[in-house]
Amino acid sequence: MKNKDLDLKSLGPQALIALRKLNRYAGILFLLLVAAVYGFVLFRIDTLSNVQPNSDDVSAMSKSTSIPKIDPKVVMQLEALKDNSENVQTLFKQARGNPFQE
């Protein structure tokens, strides 16, 4: 093993030699880099999708949710439409009977 002094002047040519040797494997190194990034993204997605909320977050959300307010004018218009149309009346009856039917 040779004992060379390491200075900035000799660092440039040594870096060029190393880059030339690595240039042969550029495609493989690129594919490995892309695979590593893809694997990391999949790992983070899996980790973040399985997070369960703690009880403090759940209680804060339940306190902050409010009952939606419906404008009385809109209610009156819907009632008028319901009374005037047989098709709408059947839709209301079906929705009351089975609200999850499409």
Image (spheres, grey):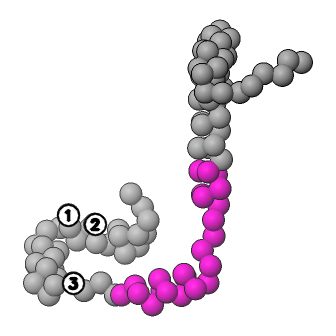
Q: Quadrant of residue 92?
A: bottom left
The residue range painted magenta reads 44-66
Nearest the camera: 39 or 59? 39
Report x, y in % for residue 102. 38, 57
Disc 3 to disc 1, how far (Cα)?
Answer: 23 Å
Nearest the camera: 44 or 24? 24
Nearest the camera: 99 or 83? 99
Q: Of the numbered discs in the image, which one, if any, rests on residue 87?
A: 1
Query: Which residue bears the numbered disc 3?
Result: 70
- Mark 2 or mark 3, which is nearer the start of the sequence? 3
Report the amino acid beneath label 1: Asn
Disc 3 to disc 2, how far (Cα)?
Answer: 20 Å
Report x, y in % for residue 9. 60, 22
Query: Which residue bears the numbered disc 2?
Result: 91
Report the amino acid beneath label 3: Ile
Whether residue 40 is situated above or below residue 6 in the rendered picture: below
- Mark 1 or mark 3, which is nearer the start of the sequence? 3
Query: For the residue labelled by badge 2, is the local secondary structure a helix, a strand or a loop?
Result: helix
Q: Is the N terminus in the top left, top right, bottom left or bottom right quadrant?
A: top right
Q: Is residue 46 magenta?
A: yes
In contact (CB < 8 Å): disc 3 and disc 1: no
Disc 2 to disc 1, how far (Cα)?
Answer: 6 Å
